[in-house]
Image (spheres, rainbow, N blue to C red):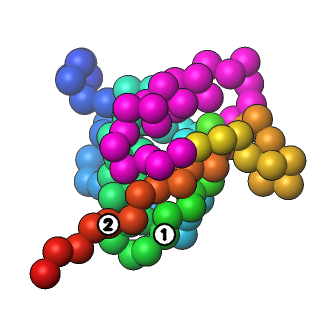
């Protein structure tokens, strides 16, 4: 049986969503390029709901392709206040610190 071209690699292995811990650290190793945007958006939304506004996104060092992709996505996300490469103790160029806008509540 041929795999469905509309099914991502992750969906083929995990037909139901796999919960990620909402702890302010998102490791993108093992996430396909195709799924990164959705994973970032969903993870950031959940972090904001529980009051986490500083997130370390681990994209790996490699040749920088994933880092550039993540940074391009972050530039377009309204929830992102700012971002910068992590300090040496938090992964240096292999991770990015993302600072989110707090949720606005109206009464």
Does 53 lie within the magenta span?
A: no
Residue 34 seen anywhere in this rendered image of the structure: yes
Which quadrant: the C terminus? bottom left
The part of the image, by quadrant, that contains residue 33 is top left
40 above or below 56? above
Q: Which callout, 2 or 1, points to the residue nearer the camera?
A: 2
Q: For mark 1, give the secondary structure.
A: loop
Residue located at (58% from left, 23% from top): 68
Between 81 and 66, the residue placed more toward the observer is: 81
Does 73 lie within the magenta span?
A: yes
Task: Say which residue label 1 marks.
Answer: 52
Residue 13 seen anywhere in this rendered image of the structure: no
82 above or below 3? below
Task: Residue at the far left: name it.
Answer: 107
Task: Say which residue label 2 marks.
Answer: 103
Q: For mark 2, give the secondary structure.
A: loop
The disc placed on residue 77 is none
- What stretch of residues is rendered in magenta? 60-82
């Amino acid at each position: 049986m041929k795999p469905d071209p509309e099914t991502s690699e992750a969906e083929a292995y995990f037909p139901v969503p796999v919960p990620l811990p909402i702890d302010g650290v998102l490791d993108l190793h093992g996430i396909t390029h195709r799924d990164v945007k959705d994973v970032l958006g969903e993870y950031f939304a959940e972090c904001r709901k529980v009051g986490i506004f500083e997130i370390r996104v681990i994209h790996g060092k490699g040749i920088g392709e994933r880092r550039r992709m993540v940074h391009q996505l972050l530039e377009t996300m309204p929830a992102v206040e700012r971002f910068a490469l992590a300090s040496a103790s938090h992964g240096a160029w292999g991770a990015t610190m993302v600072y989110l806008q707090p949720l606005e509540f109206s009464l």
